[in-house]
Image: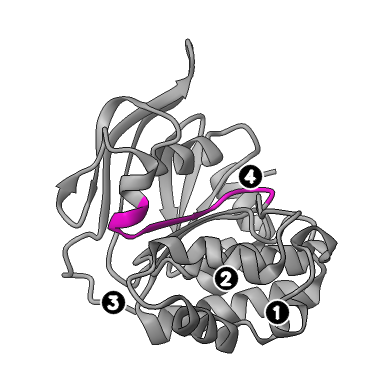
Amino acid sequence: MTASASPPLLSVGGLHSGYGRIPILGGVTLAVRPGEFVGILGHNGMGKTTLLRTLMGYLPATAGEVRFEGADITRRSPTARARMGLGYVPQGREIFPALSVRENLRMGCLLSKRGEDETIADILATFPRLKAYLDRPGGALSGGEQQLLALARCLCGGPTILLLDEPTEGIQPSIIEEIIEILLRIGRERGIALLLVEQNLTCITGLSERILILQKGVITREVPPEVARDRSLIDEFVGMA
């Protein structure tokens, strides 16, 4: 939890983006403060993934700005943003399936400011399930275990904010609970902020301090988690189906 008076860690103003001539984002404005957990909820096709990809620099902004710790990063590369402290776990996880779990974690350590062995030992303390699979190819893990690996690999780089895209998609409930518990713990112990795109109401309400509704490429309103816990209220007041 963070004080509401804290200056934003990540701020976005009037952000437009899309794919070629197809506009997707139509002027997104939001802010995430240090250590704050913010959820983004919306129909498929409303621009949630596009927003995260634009914040990370994989898609260019056509208008508006993105600031991180006060610096304008709108035109900076994904690598530059990652080195500044933005961590991104995309939808579909995108681990290296032919590399072992250990090798995947070593790839994440390329951005770490600490030694590789120290970083991996610290991460495995947070992700004990992965210890038994260090020499197993990432592609041999279950979908939920791959999601844990993707999250662990990202955290190896020492980000100050995580951008997570649908981390519970296609994952069994027991690992969803594990992911929620891990994210709450790292937020509490490491002060990492979170911007979470998620359709699973249990996950997004269990993690988020506030939830932003994204419709047709713009943030239309903000709702507290207690509203989003009730599917009928979401349907009635926010237009989710």
Residue highlighted by disc 4: 240
The kind of residue on which mark 4 rests is Met
Tag in front: 3 or 2: 2
Quick one: label 2 or label 1, which is nearer the N terminus? 1
Name the residue tied to disc 1.
130
Question: CA gap, disc 2 to disc 1?
Answer: 9 Å
- Could you classify mark 2 by the number of other residues whose Cα lies within 10 Å: few (under 14), some (14-19), or many (20 or more)? many
Q: Are marks 2 and 4 in contact (CB under 8 Å)?
A: no
Quarter of the rendering containing residue 16:
top left
The answer to which of marks 3 and 1 sits earlier in the sequence is 3
Determine the residue positioned at 32% across, 55% down.
83
Q: Nearer the viewer, mark 3 or mark 1?
A: 1
Are circles 2 and 1 on residues that touch, CB within 8 Å?
A: yes
Q: Please, what secondary structure does the residue beneath circle 1 have?
A: helix
- N-terminal of the pair, mark 3 or mark 2, is 3
Q: Is residue 158 left or right of residue 205?
A: left
The segment highlighted magenta reads 82-92
